[in-house]
Image: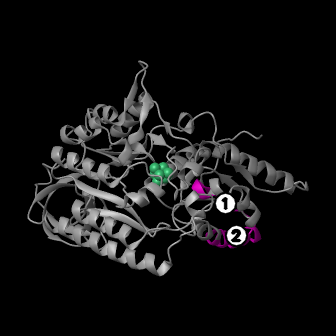
Amino acid sequence: MVSPTVSDRRKRVFIRTYGCQMNVYDSDRMADVLRPLGYDLSESAEQADLVVLNTCHIREKASEKVYSELGRLRALKLERREAGSDLTIAVAGCVAQAEGEEIARRQPAVDVVVGPQAYHRLPQLLAEVARKAALVRAGKRLPGAGVLDTEFPAESKFDHLPSPGSVRAGSAFLSIQEGCDKFCTFCVVPYTRGAEYSRPVSAILREARALVAKGAVELTLLGQNVNAYHGDAADGSTWSLARLLREIAEIDGLVRLRYTTSHPRDMDDDLIEAHGNVPQLMPYLHLPVQSGSDRILEAMNRGHGRDLFRRHVDRLRAVRPDLALSSDFIVGFPGESDSDFDDTMRLIDETGFASAFSFMYSRRPGTPGAALADQIPESVKAARLAALQALIGRQQHEFNRAKVGTTMPVLFAEAGRKPGQVLGKSPWLQSVYVDGSPSLVGRIVDVRLTDGYALSLTGQIATSLEDAA
Ligand code: SF4
């Protein structure tokens, strides 16, 4: 295999990210892996030498959307070739893992297919693409131009990534756990991301400190089952997420700490307590419940009932009364009756959410749910989803309106939609718009809230900016 070398010319990579924050983190890390090879980030495929589609398999027809994007990229590649240059196309992420060789078979313009556990090997894979291209130019006939790596390697990719990751506007993601052993019957993650794996404590603390040193005031710890975290520490002990959060909270300069995505089964006492006594831990928790019906939760193989979820919520609110709760809901799981759906609506009504992600069930090939007989008609699913989203929407609007008149610290993230506006996040992860200068981005500044809408709030800067953090 040709060894990767640092190019004497800077090249450009465009990374399109689909899906969750784990994928945003992975895209950043791919950019980190590619930088030493001479790749700077590009804003568009048209300006890039290399395009990476970092795909997600959660949504319906995810792979079809990827193939349609690949068709567009193929046309771009052909244009380039006619002009005497080239475009390298890589497919990464969960669709790459799930589809494997099928991707290069259906779309031969694809050069690299790399699974989520193997992207640290991108340099070697690109070197292999270059070697094959050189052989083809020399007149050799090859069985296929693409290279594939969808292994779950024995070594962790985290040991091979440059550290630390990226800090954007004072905020950074830090992946601490990956994979899942729970096998919910609707979900592909255990198949695409592999078995549950927790990074060692020392590596996480090193990365957390480095991110804060690079300017992060907010860290979000990521994992598919982040609260199942059980990492090895140097003294031979095993740390839980709560212990890790307490240690990271001590880092000088870190103001905000979050974690996502958690599972009700893994909310232990210590973690619940941490919400009451770790001030850096923001008053927001995304805790997916999926359904309010015990019968459906069992069919989903969730391993918990509605009571456990309700008990967690009560205990969390006892230690942190202002906690904003978010969740995931799937409507129309096979066999879901009107009365099961009513149970879900009742759970939402009783709990009160500040936001939620909700979807109609759709079959994922290879998952047990896809083979269940009692699939629900699309029209029924759509009606249930509309009712559920209307209820969550009312709760979210109410939650936002209740903050009007208060003053809260906002971490500014980017320019707003309107000229002269900046957008930031409240401690409760609400979007807050104020009139202000782009120099606010990356800073935490007190804002007095003036209006609350369905999805956001507006406000005015309440501090003298010299005093702001
Ligand atoms: S807990 Fe269930 S939904 Fe979450 S990643 Fe694992 S299998 Fe998927």
Residue 261 visible: yes
- Residue 105 appears at what percent x and percent y? 76, 62
Q: Residue at x 25, y 48 (%)?
A: 311
The local secondary structure at tag 2 comes to helix
Q: Earlier in the sequence, mark 1 or mark 2?
A: 2
Quadrant in which the N terminus appears = top right
Judge from the rendering whether residue 28 lies leftward or rightward of residue 259; answer left or right: right
Relative image position of residue 288 (x, y in whole percent): 37, 55
Quadrant location of residue 99? bottom right
Residue hosting label 1: 89
> Which residue of the protein is positioned furthest toward the top in this rendering?
235
Say the numbered circle drawn on residue 74.
2
Q: Position of residue 230 (x, y in %)?
A: 42, 33
| Cα gap from disc 1 to disc 2, whole angstroms | 8 Å
Amino acid under disc 1: Ile
With respect to residue 154, does 54 lie above or below?
below
What is the magenta range? 68-95
Disc 2 residue: CB within 8 Å of ligand 1: no
